Image (cartoon, helix red, strand yellow):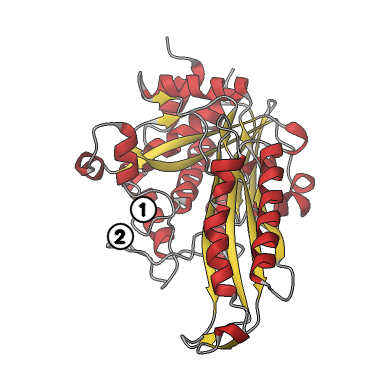
Amino acid sequence: MTSPAARTALDLTAGLPVPALEDLYRDLHRHPELSLQEHRTAGKLAERLRAAGYETTDGIGGTGVAGVLRNGDGPVVLLRADMDALPVQEETGLPYASLTPGLMHACGHDLHVTWLAGAADALAAGRDAWSGTLLVVGQPAEETGSGAARMVADGLYERVPRPDVLLAQHAVPGPAGLYGHTPGLILSASTDIEILVHGLGGHGSRPESAVDPVVTAAFLVTRLQTIVSREVAAGEAAVLTVGRIEAGARPNIIPAEARISLNIRTRSEPVRERMIAAVRRIAAGECAAAGCPREPEVLVGDSFPLTVNDPETDRRVAAVHGEVFGAGTVLDPGPAMASEDFPHLAVDGLPYAYWFVTSTPAAVWDAAPGDDLGEKLAAVPGNHSPHFAPDLSTVAPGVRTLVSGALAYLVN
């Protein structure tokens, strides 16, 4: 038998204005904005929330938006969507591709905002069917790991009611129509690190009179890869990626310095600390071996926390999703190595659930090479790819997931 929450969710989303929501998604996709620059996106969301009757506050933590709909006694449920885009040149060829050179919604945050706006409208229109308080949050700067913390530091929970439970979702590659729930650890921690190698500049024809930081940086990139393979236990999960190397201006000039930017992903704090210590040690050792005139500078930068679902909360939402979407649609993918700053909104250990919505168009998925799920996932465009293009068929289901998740708490 279907639960009251599932029945109510199906009723409230039966008449979703799908064409209008698709238009909103296309508009947001055409106009991507980087972290803490999401003024247009935030304005679009705030405008819709006000029109739907939400007490709306904008400019929280820079460009964050919060809408409150008070609807009698009951829990306070927070629904969150991130809003920022990425410095990626779009290559999808879509008719609604980004109009801003070098910027793209390559992670699906435009779809997240669309889902949130649709859910906010549906729940406001159907407020006779539930009781409690709905808190809708459009969060900036997820990609830098700073947006959620900025909103909290700027007094989010002094301006709006403190939630009893927090819910969020993310578009991911995979055959559209699946919903990934993992009770417990679902996303890894992430830490960015910068290494500045100090060399001694000189003419390319006289390397003996210089200390070449480019060669040292090249050794460093190779040696850093041994941290995971040689220093992290086989039973632990960790990733180290060097994403940027910068040095020099001309082919015949040995530069005075080189900069390396890398990222580590871990599933425990001890492993994270061990990897950071290893980066420092290897950087110092390679620079000493090269005769660099100064020790390297190692700066630990942006970081993301572990995302650990409250098991009871996740199971409760997953159960409703299974009722709404049918048998076989909800699965447990296990923890991923991606990262999120959503847990920063869950101050003082507030319970939350975070899940995945698969979004690869059927034609793209069917055409992808591979005989199993893993091979196909590696072959289709994923998050942060210049070819990432979620299927428009996920617009209505993504609204429905948020509505049903909220109603799991707002309907008795």
As measured in the structure, the alpha-carbon distance from the residue carrying label 1 to the one carrying label 2 is 7 Å
- Label 1 SS: loop
Q: Position of residue 374 (x, y in %)?
A: 34, 35
Please name the amino acid that badge 1 sits on.
Answer: Phe
Closer to the camera in the image, 408 or 335: 335
CB within 8 Å, label 1 to label 2? yes
| Picture disc at residue 92 | 2
Q: Badge 1, how many Cα within 10 Å: few under 14, some, many 20+?
A: many
| 85 up-or-down from 21: above or below | below
| 202 up-or-down from 31: above or below | below
Q: Position of residue 175 (x, y in %)?
A: 31, 36
- Label 2 SS: loop
Q: In this rendering, does residue 369 appear at all?
A: yes
| 31 up-or-down from 308: above or below | below
Identify the residue under disc 1.
Answer: 388
Q: In this rendering, does residue 339 appear at all?
A: no
* Residue at the image position 54 percent from the left and 71 percent from the top: 215
In the rendered image, the quadrant that contains the C terminus is top right
Q: Position of residue 398 (x, y in %)?
A: 42, 38
Q: Badge 2, how many Cα within 10 Å: few under 14, some, many 20+?
A: some
Residue 371, picture quadrant: top left
Please name the amino acid that badge 2 sits on.
Answer: Thr
* Residue at the image position 22 percent from the left and 41 percent from the top: 369
In the rendered image, the quadrant that contains the N terminus is top left
Closer to the camera in the image, 283 or 183: 283
Looking at marks 1 and 2 on the same chain, the residue that comes earlier in the sequence is marked by 2
Q: Position of residue 153 (x, y in %)?
A: 77, 52
